[in-house]
Image: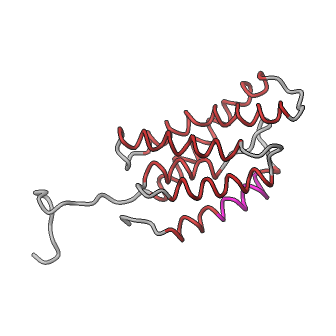
Amino acid sequence: MSRMRWYIFAIVFIVAFFLQTTILWRVPVHGFSPNLLLCLVVVFSFMYDERYGLVFGLIFGVLLDLTQSLYFGPQTLTFFLAYITAGLMRKVFNQEKVIPDVLCVLIITPLYAFILWGSCRLAGNPKDVGYVIESLPSLLVMHALLTALFHLLFVRSIIRHRRDRRYKSDLV
């Protein structure tokens, strides 16, 4: 699978959105539930050169903001930052390796937690920053595992070149 089509991205994001808003939202771990869409934005933005990770991330970020956030923008901002971070890491690291993908989500997850905490704090939630710091390790583990799983599910195969000495064509 060298290239994914836009409709595959759409189906994956729609399924993740419904899982996120129905099942995972109701079962928080240490006050947070894992964000499947954030992990998908990181994986698709890191692995594929197309901008579908950004487009679907922004679309579903807006939908999450409308359905779950108290203010408009925290999810969308986080998904945009995830796309930028994954794009920068894609220029440095091999896209087929899972470790840089997990490293990318480990960078984005604290930003995600603090942006959501800040928006809830603006809305009048009395929880202090210690709440976020206390729940961050479990959120980091959940996002790292989900990102590794998604990466292994959607990893694309190596494209071999004819000049490679180990290349065997079907015609020869």
Q: How many marks?
A: 0
Left or right, 85 with respect to 134, comes to: left
- Quarter of the rendering occupied by the C terminus: bottom left
Left or right, 132 with respect to 83, comes to: right
Give the answer, above or below, for where 63 lies relative to 6.
above
Query: Which secondary structure class fits the magenta region best?
Result: helix
Identified at 59% across, 64% down, the residue is 12
Left or right, 25 with respect to 15, comes to: right
Left or right, 68 with respect to 55, comes to: right
Identified at 70% across, 34% down, the residue is 113
Q: Position of residue 129 (x, y in %)?
A: 77, 23
Q: Give yes or no for residue 15 being in the magenta stretch.
A: yes
Q: Position of residue 149 (x, y in %)?
A: 53, 51
Give the answer, above or below, for where 92 lies relative to 52.
above
Q: Residue furthest bottom?
A: 171
The magenta span reads 14-24
Q: Give yes or no for residue 101 being in the magenta stretch.
A: no
What is the quadrant of residue 111 in the picture? top right
Q: Position of residue 160 (x, y in %)?
A: 22, 60
Identified at 53% across, 55% down, the residue is 53
Residue nearest the viewer, comparing 15 with 86: 86
What is the quadrant of residue 4 in the picture? bottom left
Residue nearest the viewer, comparing 168 with 103: 103
- Quarter of the rendering occupied by the N terminus: bottom left
Identified at 64% across, 58% down, the residue is 59
Residue nearest the viewer, comparing 103 with 172: 103
Q: Position of residue 9 (x, y in %)?
A: 54, 64
